Image (tube, rainbow, N blue to C red):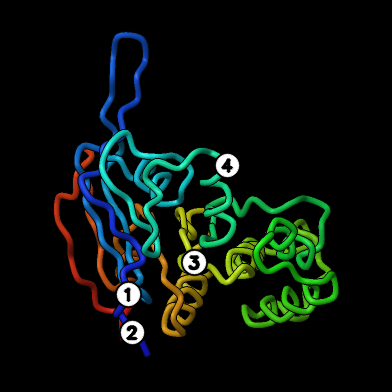
Amino acid sequence: MKKNNKTIIDGKDLVKIYRMGEFEVRALNGASIQVQESEFIAIMGPSGSGKTTLMNVLGCLMSPTSGEYFLDGEDVSDLDKVELAQIRNNKLGFIFQSYNLLARTPALQNVILPLFYDRITPLTDQEQLEKAAQILDSVGLGDRIYHEPQELSGGQQQRVSIARALVNDPVMVLADEPTGNLDSKSGAEIMELLVSLNKQGTTIVMVTHDPAIAEYTDRTIHLLDGKVEREVKNGKGGK
């Protein structure tokens, strides 16, 4: 059951300016966004609307030029690169369109990787193995934990990516076109898995270009020219 009683993302008047010589591009131009705990949100917009830049800011891959960004109650607007890296590893999980798995490396080791960098609640080697195996089992890959990426289908590789995103118990998962490399059947299965994880309490923010994929979420935030143009409530995600 969803709580929706805690703000995970609170971004106010976010501006991101890229400077190239004497020219500047405002990739974000005053975007404001809020996401509550256990929400499933889609972000959509045409090319150049600011989707990627917004995801990079929300994912603590870069800081905004101006504006405020609170992640899980913490102001991360002005953190340096080292501090942002710590926040990413401790609070965020990432799912990529191209999976970003290590080649010739078993699924179990791919999932364990984020745990190597956990300095707050470090686990023993055995605890890491057990936790990674448990999460792989929870995403339907209990019998594939020793398979390397090239031995897995695209849908199975994305499940490994999802397990890796969850292994550090993040406050939020960011998914960038998670079905973009999959056929429609595999894509639907991945979305059903994300909906199931969301119903268990996982907060998910997803970029997609596909309106049918966005329909799986609670609401869609549409960007245009670096601002939030409108928000639409959807039918599937919160049920």
Q: Which of marks 3 and 4 is in front?
A: 4
Q: Earlier in the sequence, mark 3 or mark 4?
A: 4
Q: How far is the residue under mark 4 from the one under mark 2?
A: 32 Å
What residue lies at 39% left-to-right and 41% top-to-bottom?
78
Q: Who is closer to the viewer here, 233 or 4?
A: 4
Do tag 4 and tag 2 residues touch (Cβ < 8 Å)?
no
Where does the C terminus fall, quadrant-wise? Answer: bottom left
Q: Which of marks 4 and 2 is nearer the N terminus?
A: 2
Q: How far is the residue under mark 2 from the one under mark 3?
A: 27 Å
Q: What residue type is labelled 1?
A: Lys
Q: What residue type is labelled 3?
A: Gly
Pointer 4: what residue?
82
What residue lies at 74% left-to-right and 64% top-to-bottom?
112
Pointer 3: what residue?
187
The answer to whether residue 227 is above or below residue 43 is: above
Q: Is residue 156 left or right of residue 142?
A: left
What residue lies at 82% left-to-right and 56% top-to-bottom?
105
Do tag 1 and tag 2 residues touch (Cβ < 8 Å)?
yes
Q: Is residue 211 left or right of residue 93?
A: left
Q: Position of residue 151 (x, y in %)?
A: 78, 62
Pointer 1: what residue?
6
What residue lies at 57% left-to-right and 61% top-to-bottom?
90
Where does the N terminus fall, quadrant-wise? Answer: bottom left
Q: How far is the residue under mark 1 from the one under mark 2?
A: 8 Å
Disc number at residue 3?
2
Q: What residue type is labelled 4?
A: Val
Q: Which of marks 2 and 3 is nearer the N terminus?
A: 2
Which type of secondary structure does the marked residue at label 3 adopt?
helix
Q: Earlier in the sequence, mark 1 or mark 4?
A: 1
Which type of secondary structure does the marked residue at label 1 adopt?
loop
The answer to whether residue 167 is above or below residue 19 is: below
Q: Is residue 143 left or right of residue 28?
A: right
